[in-house]
Amino acid sequence: MRTGRDIAGHRAPGAAVTVAILAAVMLALSAPAARAQTYTDVLKGHWARAQIDWVTDQGPAGNKMLDDFGATFKPNALVTRAQLARAVVIASGHNGDEIDPVKIADVPADHPFFRDIALALQLKLMGGFKDGFHPGAAATSWQVDRAVIRALRKKYTDDDWSMLRALSPGKWRPNEGFKTGAPRYFPSEVAARYLQLHFNHPSTAEGQEVSPGEKIERDEVAYILYQALNTSAWRIDGLTAFNSVTLPKLTTRQKEIVRFACKYIGYPYVWAGEYPSKDSPYGAQAHGGFDCSGFVWWVMKMHFGYTINERVASDMAAAAPRRITRANLVPGDVIFWGPDGPKSKAAEVYHTGIYLGKGWFIHSTGSSDGVSLASLNWAGWSWKTDFAWGRRVLKKSQITLPTAASSAADLAAPAFAPLPDPAIDARAELEFR
């Protein structure tokens, strides 16, 4: 049963209150100013009202982004592929481009979205199907993320977008000959989660979360577009940290862990979540997804069967037979963070993830609203400064121990690391417990 379970680690109440207050102030300062005219079906208390008002004011007169129904917005309606095409073409800044002569099987030339769809295909913001574009079909979350990321790439052509190709499953080999089998949307989800495009719904509204393969509502898409079009230049620059995600030599079991964990990239952050769908055998969830310890539990305990009898990050940390130092981590180790790094008490541990090697780890974090990649080597981030210790659950026969040379290389920072950002600081996890 989930009732009464303390899902996360603890910190002093005063610190938690301070973080919550600062988060509220930052949110208030960063919220977009609503335009004078709003939609009759988007009430004042709607969680994305300001973002909807801003987004639907972008674009040329009579062809605004997601402004598809006159006086109403229909926030809970599913976004169609035609509506998405218009939105991302406008977002890319190419809505004024000339269109090449084209025939689309299921989109006649007099279709109200013909021009937008033709441009979305021409600019490769979206793809089609053998029998047409399917303009009235609902778009999935991963399709929206990919289209929005591609729109940003078209908008900011001077930036380095190499990570989208480097992490494509057909190309990405984290070590020689190893194909991860990651989903086709892996690179765009890594980018979307790093750029914080998704809204992390509070624990009282977890049912509104959306997994990559699920159809997505219009209010969620408006929020994603707002975040994308208002992201900072340095945050986009930070995507180059993913240009070369390499891992050390892996055993068969370590490859299995990497392959399985990467399947869940982009699954949402759900408080107390420990299962990819609502029907968890440990009690129904509001939505499929994971909190930080729930993701570790799902991968290492429920799938691979390792002896992890604890469900809370701090308890998992306390149960480590020995504390693995940063230099001695191996892929498959469970890793923890605390406010005083290695000097933290187990009860102070506030976050956990799964180590993949060479500094890279995978985790579920509220600040990115889901499963994402990050590195212990990013200077100035709490992922590096607050790393506490690791816990080894793999058997000796399932690991390759690091040599002195490999340890030194593993600890070396990448050529480019994203700048520090309090909004993605690991300590922000306190807000989502």
Image (cartoon, helix red, strand yellow):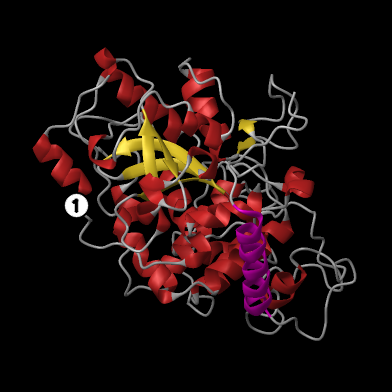
- Residue displayed at 49% across by 60% down: 424
Asked if residue 331 lies left or right of residue 126, the reply is left
Corner quadrant of residue 237: bottom left
| Segment colored magenta | 12-32
Q: Where is residue 397 in the image (x, y as percent from the top left)?
A: 25, 13
Q: What residue type is labelled 1?
A: Ala
Q: Name the residue under label 1.
A: 412
Q: Relative to 222, does residue 287 appear above or below in the rendering?
A: above
Residue 432 in view (yes/no): yes
Q: Is mark 1 on a helix, strand or loop?
A: loop
Q: Position of residue 229 (x, y in %)?
A: 54, 73
Which residue is nearer to you in this view: 428 or 53?
A: 428
Q: Position of residue 232 (x, y in %)?
A: 46, 74
In magenta stretch: residue 14:
yes
Residue 266 in view (yes/no): no
- Residue displayed at 35% across by 19% down: 394
Corner quadrant of residue 290: top right
Q: Relative to 179, does residue 151 appear above or below in the rendering?
A: below
Q: In which quarter of the image is the N terminus?
A: top right
